[in-house]
Image (spheres, helix red, strand yellow):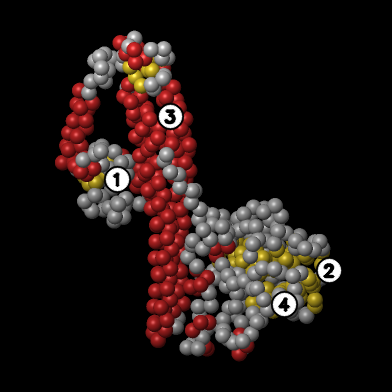
Amino acid sequence: MASALEEDLICSICHEVFRDPVILSCCHSFCKNCLDNWWREKQLRECPICKSTSGRKHPLCNLALKNLCEALLMERAHKASTVSEPLCSLHSEKLKLFCLDHQQPICLICRDSKAHTSHKFRPIDEVAQDHREELQKSLKPVQEKLKLFQQIKGKFDETAERIKVQAQQTESQIKKQFKKLHHFLQEEEEARIKALREEEKQKSQMMKEQIDALIREITALSDTIRVTEKELKAEDVSFILNYRTAAERVQQRPMMNEPQLVTGALTDVAKHLGNLSYNVWNKMKEKVSYSPVILDPNTAHPHLALSEDLTSVSFRQNKKLPDIPERFNSYRIVLGSDGFKSGSHSWDVEVGDSTQWIVGVAKESSVRRRPQSIKSGLWVVWLCDGRYATLSPTDPSSYLLVKKMQKIRVCLDLNKGKLSFSDPDTNVHIHTFTHTFPEKMFPVIGISCSLTLKILPELDDEDAIPGKDRNRTRMCDVSIALQHH
């Protein structure tokens, strides 16, 4: 076991005695190569322990620490060179054989003694090689588990960073909207910012705890591997004497289950930005508008970009985003942030001159990660190659004989089990699905062209005030389109 002094001479990155130690302005020291690799990977010159930013590109050498570490290494080398080869405790002879019956190293005199009569023996180097191979085989799954956990930690790190980015972007958007509401809305703004920061703190803490657990498991696995590999390099007799302990250490090493990102790991942006202005309607009714549809960015395909207020969607080049369970990664669609389990709901969608779009609803359990068919949970009307068509998992697909539409109205009656589409400009019925929807249904839209599509504010209507006893939600004027990979 390392002494307290030796523990102070261990690098917190590589967990070995410092090599060419350098010191940061925060007084933390690291191996020069370890710190260079850390900064190169993170692309940030910050302390790996306290995260403070380093003002120096090339930190100063910690000469005092370097001298202590070199002295420690020399002392260890001297001790290792003075250790003599173990001898037989009975005859003080070299241990050259291994008794298979007693499972212990013996000398040549022991072989001829009465205690080992009729016993079987093997050269100790052969037994050591067999045990090395067995231990190496046991060590392999531990090494593979370490590699897997390191990969998972990388994904968790990306998600943790995304949480912070979302929080920063959301805070900026909240401040931008509240600036238009002037000073008397300052208290409302502060309340929203506080809620956002509390969520960021909670979810960041949750992610930090999971990452810390991973780090502890990775450290434990690394220690097991390092100690075992050191045993594998020992002399045959020393290895044989320590083999049982080493084997038990590897075989009894508990393996935690592979961690997985849970649904809802990211910041609930829709909760903070959704209908933000409308929620203060009673204070500045004449200056705000209400959008009854808020899109959920955590479900959006990486090719879709949402506006700051989450009411517009447009096409963009692929952006690297955390691969979370909520996100559609095969079809360029996005869901509304709120779903429906009962009642009657309708919304108008402005499709304009878009040549490819899709409008309808999706069930909550829709397969989102490379499903075999787009029909696996969507009830929609869509336009492709100049032809309107229906698509659902319950009805055969069919083409619709309708004139070009600028808008399409979606009416979902969950009590009657009907989903209807019509042209709100001409009041012409387009199509109706009849089906008993057993789970929560969400509005779904998609786009594959360069158009920007906007959810227009709902007209001032007493029936649209939140809190009124009503079961009809109206979404107005959204443009959309879909490109199937």
Q: Residue at x 66, y 68 (%)?
A: 439
For the residues labelled 3 and 4, say whether their Cβ atoms are less than 8 Å apart.
Answer: no
At a point 42% along the width and 39% down the height, the residue shown is: 252
Residue topped by disc 1: 12
Pointer 2 and pointer 4: residues touching (CB < 8 Å)? no
- On the image, the x and y values in percent for residue 84 come to 23, 20
Q: Earlier in the sequence, mark 4 or mark 1?
A: 1
Nearest the viewer among 266 and 87 is: 87
| Disc 3, SS | helix
Q: How far apart, in angstroms, are the residues tagged by discs 2 and 1?
A: 69 Å
Where residue 420 sits, quadrant-wise, is: bottom right
Pointer 3 or 2: first along the chain: 3
Residue at 40% x, 86% y: name it: 184
Between marks 3 and 2, how big is the CA–CA gap? Answer: 72 Å
Query: Label 3 neighbourhood size at 10 Å, few (<14), some (14-19), many (20+)?
Result: many
Residue 217 shows in this picture: yes
Amino acid tagged 2? Leu
Q: Nearer the viewer, mark 2 or mark 1?
A: 1
Which residue is located at x 67 percent, y 54 percent? 371
The vertical placement of 291 against 47, above or below, is below
The span from disc 2 to disc 4 (Cα, nearest Å) is 29 Å
Frontmost residue, 284 versus 336: 336
Question: Residue reaching furthest right?
Answer: 401
Q: Upstream in the sequence, badge 2 or badge 4?
A: 2
In three-dimensional space, the C-alpha distance between marks 3 and 1, rounded to whole angstroms, equals: 28 Å
The nearer-to-camera label among 3 and 1 is 3
Residue at image mark 3: 135
Measured from the top left, where is residue 35 in percent x and y?
A: 31, 44
Q: According to the image, label 2 marks what residue?
A: 401
User: Which mark is nearer the camera, 2 or 4?
Assistant: 4
Report, in whole angstroms, how far the alpha carbon at label 4 lies from the one at label 1: 61 Å
Q: Which residue is mark 4?
A: 415
